Image (spheres, rainbow, N blue to C red):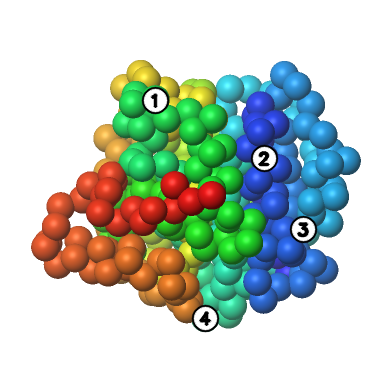
Amino acid sequence: MRLSVIVISYNMARELPRTLQSLSPAMQRGICAEDYEVLVIDNGSSAPIDEDACNLILPNLVFCRLESPSPSPVRAINMGLKRARGDLIGVFIDGARMASPGMLANALAAASLSSRPAISTLAFHLGPRVQMESVREGYDRDAENALLHASKWQEDGYRLFDIAALAGSSRWGWFRCPAETNALFLKGEHWREIGGYDEGFETPGGGLANLDVWARICADLSFSVITLLGEATFHQVHGGVATNSLNPPQEAFHAEYERLRGRPFRPPSRALTFFGTPPQQALRWIAHSAQLAQGEVAPDASLPNLWPATQSQE
């Protein structure tokens, strides 16, 4: 098996099928179904996922349920890392994040550039601005359902760039190191070498666990940090403790990090190698990223001027 993708799910009956559809051979380009597997690790959902329906969406799908689940997804991720069969393994800590169509093929191709590749992607939020702001203005599942329906994203997954905004952790765009990546690919041997995710992160949603593993990788100069240019994840609104809460527990997250690491969290700074052939829909965001890198504009996740009329299409 060339590639495994681990997707963590918790009460995502609405969001997970879309994520799986975005990862399916029907939507991923340049990769065959037999080249990869997707492992969905359920972290204690109160209502079971319709596994039969999901298996119709995506072959080579493996469902696992974590025994004695916790509010943090970290143990679920590490269980997935132990069960994954791929030479290259990608982790989606949040099963509500849809993937752009070239992500998997480009991750496999980028892995050949180095003996120690760490392959990252940029993060976007569906909706007119970062969801911590948009949910305060009424953006919800119904609004998002209408937005996705109007975009006709199933016909071309890159249309998600037309209905999204840069996530806060990626607010500087492609040409600066992000604070985290929400689809991270390492070789299986390297996941084992770094010990996977730190299970000391026990706060709901994992706190800063995802930022921690990315910061650890960026600090290790033996890794070649490769960013997929023109590929991204797109976060669906689902009531997440960090992205969709009106009062996210940031103080608790940072206190936990400082207790575990003995210092405040600082976003990593690392030179990036870029790989990929950007689609037309990403070019506006790449141009904006260049402006950010040159200091011509300030980071602003809303960017209404980059929104086309997609949300009003029928």
Mark before the other along the chain sequence, 1 or 2: 2
The CA span between labels 1 and 3 is 37 Å
Q: Tag 1: Cα neighbours inside 10 Å, few (<14), some, or many (≥20)?
A: few
- Single out the mark in the foreground, 1 or 3: 1
- Image coords of residue 298 (percent x, y): 15, 52
Residue at image location 70% in from the left, 42% down from the top? 17
Label 2 or label 4, whichever lies nearer to me, is 2
Mark nearer the viewer, 4 or 3: 3
Does residue 232 appear to the left or right of 19 in the view shown?
A: left
Which of the image's four quarters has the N terminus? bottom right
Q: Give the secondary structure at mark 3.
A: strand
Task: Please report contact status of discs 4 and 3: CB closer than 8 Å, yes or no.
Answer: no
Label 3 is placed on what type of residue?
A: Glu
Q: Mark 4 points at which residue?
A: 113
What amino acid is labelled 4 in the image?
Leu
Of label 2 and label 3, which has the lower sequence position? 2
Camera-side residue of 217 and 138: 138
- Report, in whole angstroms, how far the alpha carbon at label 4 lies from the one at label 3: 22 Å
Q: Which residue was labeled with disc 3?
A: 37
Query: Do the numbered discs 4 and 1 sit on residues whose CB atoms are within 8 Å?
Result: no
Tag on residue 138? 1
